[in-house]
Every structure is written in C-alpha cells, then in structure tokens.
Amino acid sequence: MTLTIFNIPFRRTAFLFAVVATLSGCGGPSRGPVTVFLDGAGWFAGSSPVKAGLKDAGDRGDFETFVWSSGLGPAHDHLVVASTRGVGRRLAARLEKIRQRAPNARINVIALSAGTSVVLNALEQMKPGVAVDNVVLLSSSSSESRDLTPLMAHVRGRLYATCSTNDGILSSLITNADHKDGNPAGLTGFKPPRRNSPDTRAAYARVVNLPWKPAYLAYDWNGGHTAATNRKFIAAVIAPRILSNEPFPADRPVMAAP
Amino acid sequence: MLDAGNAAPIRRMYTAALLMGLAGTLSGCATGQDYEIGQRAERNQEPHVAYDAYCRAAAKNPDNGTIKSAIKRVTPKAADYWEKQGHLAAGEKRYADAWRNFMHVLEIRPDHPSAGLVIRQLEQQHPTEVAYARQEFEQRGARSLVASGQGAGQTQVAQSGSTPYGRTATADLGSEDDIYVPPSRVRGTPPPPPPPPTAGKYGPQTGAGSSSAVTASPMSPMPSSSAPIPYNPPAPRYAQTPTPFPPTAPMATAPPMTANAGQPTGFMVVRTLSKEDRRYARRREFVDGVAIRIDDVDDDEADLELFMGGIRIAEIKGIRINESARFVGQTGRQFRLIVLDIRESTETVRIGVSPIN
C-alpha cells in the first residue's frame, strides 16, 4: 500500500513541500543583494522593468515588491496611504526581518513616486542599529525640504534621488505625498536643511541627487515621471551605484563630507 | 483629361505629399541647429562633438525621437573617444587630464565596464595630481570635466556655441566656467604643443612693494612621451574584489601638484573674462591671491592686468592665443597663465593658469 497525502504519493508530497518551503524563504539566509521595490501610487508596472534592469546589470540577488497600495486609487494612495505611519512601520518591519535573516547581505530599497514617502517613513521608524545599504528614490513626490538626517542613520551607503523638471506629474501635484512644504524632490532634488549640524552634513554627504540630463536619453529616461523605472536606465545608471561596494566616482553629494 | 471622378484622388495625393513634405521639414526644424551641427560632426567622424551637440538639442527637445536616436547612436563612440583620450593623457603622465577624461566617459556611459576602476586607480596612484580635478568636479560637476593643458582640450566646444560647424542659435555658454577651445584643437587628434610666445614681447614688470614679477617666456616643450602606463584591462566591475575607497580628506585648497621641474602639469583654474559679455566678469581672482583683469582686446591680442590685494602688479600687452606669461603669487609660488581663446567681438578672453615647480 502506498502512503498518500491528499491522494498524492508521500514522496512526491514531500518533494513538493520542500520546493514550496525553499521558495517561501525557509531555505536559508540569502547571501546575495536583496532589493525591495515600492511602486508609485496606483501604479503597478514599475517592478518588472526595475527587476529586469538589475538583472541585466548582473544582480543575482533577491527581488521583492512591497505592496503598500490600498487599492482605492492613486489619489487616495498618494494623499492618505503614503504618509500613514502604519504603512511605514510595516515596511520597516519587513526590512528588519530581511536584515535579521541576512545580516551581511546588501539590502537596497528602490521606490517610485509616492512609494518614496513610504520608504522615508519606514527608515525613520526602523530600530536603532538596523540599516539598509542603499536607497533609490525615483521621481519622489516627497518634499524636497524633508530633513533626511534622522533616517540616514539607517542607510549605510547612499540615498539617490532622481529628479527632473520635465516631470509633468510632479509639476501638477497639489500636495506632496508626505504633506510637507516645498517642491517634490523628484522635481528639483533634495535640499539640505538650513541648520548645519555635523550630523546633518554627515547625512547629506551621502545624499546624491541625480538630475535628468540629455545623456540619459540613451537609456530611455526622458525625464518623465515613470520613465525613471525604465529597464535600461536602471541597468546603466542606478545599478552601477547600488551593486558596488565602492562609491560611484561621478556622484556629487548634496553636501561635502564634514 | 481630368474629370470630376479622377480629380479628387489626385488632389488628395498632392495634399498628402504636401503634408508629408511639410512634416518632414518641420521635424527637421524641430530638431534645431544643434542637431544639424551634430550631423555634420558625425559625418566628419567626430562623435564627441556630435554627442555634445545632440545633448544640447535634447535639452531643448527631450521628447524628440530623432534626437534621442542620435544620442543613442553616438553615445558608445563618444565614450570610446574620451576613453582613448584618457589613456593618451595617462601615458603622457597628465593624470589630471586622464582623470577628467575618464570621468567624462562615466558621465556619458555610467555603466562603462572599466572607467570607474581606472578612475580609482588614478586616485590611488596619483592622488596629488588628481586632487584638484576632483575638487573642481565636486564643486562644478560635469562642466569641470575638460581635459586642460596641452593635451586634449577637445571637449565642451559645442557647449560654447562656437564650433567649426557653425555657431548655434543660442550660443549658450552655460556656466561661466565652461571651456571652449581654439578651433585648432577640435580635429580629434592630440594637438601639437603650442608654439612658444614671441620672446621679449612683454618684459618683466614689477609692481611697487610686491614680490611678484611677470615674465614672458617661451612655453617649455612638452615632455617627451614616456612609456604608457600599463592599464591592464580590468575585469567587469562586479567581478573585482572590492577595495576600500581611499578616504579623501576635505580640502580647503588644492594641494601642490608634483611635476617635472619647470613643466606645467595642467591648469589649476580656467576662467573666462569679458569686457562686453555680461555673463562674465572683467576681472576675477585666479590663484594665490592674484586676480587678472582684461584691459583691452584688439584683433587677436589681449592686454591683461594682474592685481594682488587691489594693487596692480603687472601688465601684459598684446598676448595672443596659446601664448603665456609667468607670474609669482602671494606665497611666492610661480604660475603660468596661458591664453586659451580670444573673441574680439565681445572682448572675451579665456585664460588658464597652471603652477610651475
């Protein structure tokens, strides 16, 4: 008599169970880079090209999409959900769990538009001593004048922010996703706060704005809002910065190191 | 013979042809003069000039598909060009120029497989020589990436608005620190050393109470090319064992550059001065407490004045492009100024200053 489970032979069942367990993350800690991606408000097409771009650049690590959308439409997500501390806390917990599972792995966080507000909220709420490696904010609808000093304590490497004055969506925003004043950072880049403490200078010495320039047309980013997630742009411009152990030579941080 | 039945289709055909011609003309106009300059440069096998021209066109029309295609087409060739210039400069021990050229490669192709590694090599092996170039880049960005000195001033010509292929409609020089170079340097080959200035054209002049002197001297010949530095083609970026990035201390002033005795190593600073063009100042501080002012520009000659602490310390009369003059700064260090370009129409002069050891 053959032992069966749900009418499936036991050996096959055990094999299937092992496959599922491995795929679900029970197979052991990840050693490669881990990329967590957040899409924009009401936008669900960014993860695929970003993932493909990273793969094109040689990233063999894990890629996961953090879903933060409420499903109630882009306006609700942008105006309400993106600035909700609970959503930020949920992402922070997810990042802490990844870090706990893979203490030495490189964790990169990439986000688009209102998703960047969720990321910034999450970084502010992370536990002390826990950090991700690099953060990439594509076409951020968070405020340019948001003080990044406290959250940069949870970023080991650099925070990159693409910006473009050709971004028609950000140009027409009534309010930023984080409800703070100023232009969206995705238009003009992050600006350092007026107070110039050593901590602020140290933090902003690792914040790099990537303003659009004609050279990026070769990589299919024309300065548009969602075009920054384009596969070629991610592979050629973003990946070299976040997949390497060393600072990218052409980076110009917002402030000089103290 | 045309009848009512045949006339309508023929009229439609002519209308369609007219519209197509109009569209073709308009699309060409929409790409602009910069695009035309880029096209001519491409035909003349100068991808770096073409690239700059197309980028200028794209800045005005980022959604234009024709310009985008052109940029995509010349991007690899322009990056190759600057890579070659970088290796040439490194072989001639012009490490600052080499650094700038490879940074230029990275600006064009951020995913270039070896430019980043070569840049780090230069920073590790020749930190003093490239320190000023790095400092300039951090302050001014890509506009500082001009290979200066006698090596390769090939870049940014298009940005100056003045190229062998014509002047752009806007002639926007952008930042006042943009470099434009004499036409003799835009042909894609390493230019010969500039001819020595006429000896004795401007004798030594000293200001009262100052320790500086201006002497005209012939340009020292470029050092003969030494064996090129072996740059082993590095493996792809992510296959390398990561090496710690050398920490760079913040610099308030550029450290002294080492060089062969008497040989300028590259420009410490390049400035544009103008009497008529309001985008530029008529007088600016250059190095070591010395400021330079345009007195007059006539034909292809310029009259310059040097100041220290508000006091005029020297006059240079009738200096021409590629001619130089020596002066001593506040600290006693010697420098050489070289006239890079003169535009009589706007009485504008471009000057580079380099230290002499």
Image (tube, coloured by chain):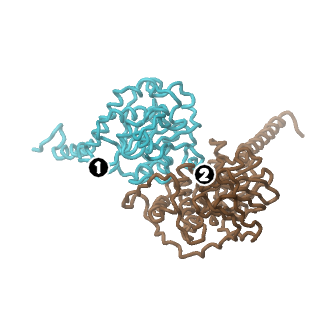
Chain colours: A cyan, B brown
The residue sitting at the left extreme is A1
The answer to whether residue B206 is left or right of residue B105 is right
Badge 1 crowding class, 10 Å Cα cut-off, few under 14, some 14 to 19, many 20 or more, is few
Residue at image location 32% in from the left, 39% down from the top? A95
What's the amino acid at mark 1? Answer: Asn
Residue A104 is tagged as 1
The answer to whether residue B57 is left or right of residue A255 is right
Q: Nearer the viewer, residue A190 or B333?
A: B333
Residue A226 is tagged as none
Q: Quadrant of the N terminus of chain B?
A: top right
Q: Position of residue A220 (x, y in %)?
A: 55, 46
Residue at image location 25% in from the left, 45% down from the top? A22
Q: Are marks 2 and 1 on the same chain?
A: no
Q: Chain of mark 2?
A: B
Q: Position of residue A133 (x, y in %)?
A: 36, 45
How many numbered dots are placed on residues in this image?
2
Q: Does residue A254 appear in this view? A: yes
Q: Position of residue B50 (x, y in %)?
A: 66, 55
Q: Quadrant of the C terminus of chain B?
A: bottom right
Vertical position of residue A186 compared to residue B312: above or below: above
Residue at the disc numbered 2: B143
**Gap between marks 2 and 1, in whole Å?**
38 Å
Q: Nearer the viewer, mark 2 or mark 1?
A: 2
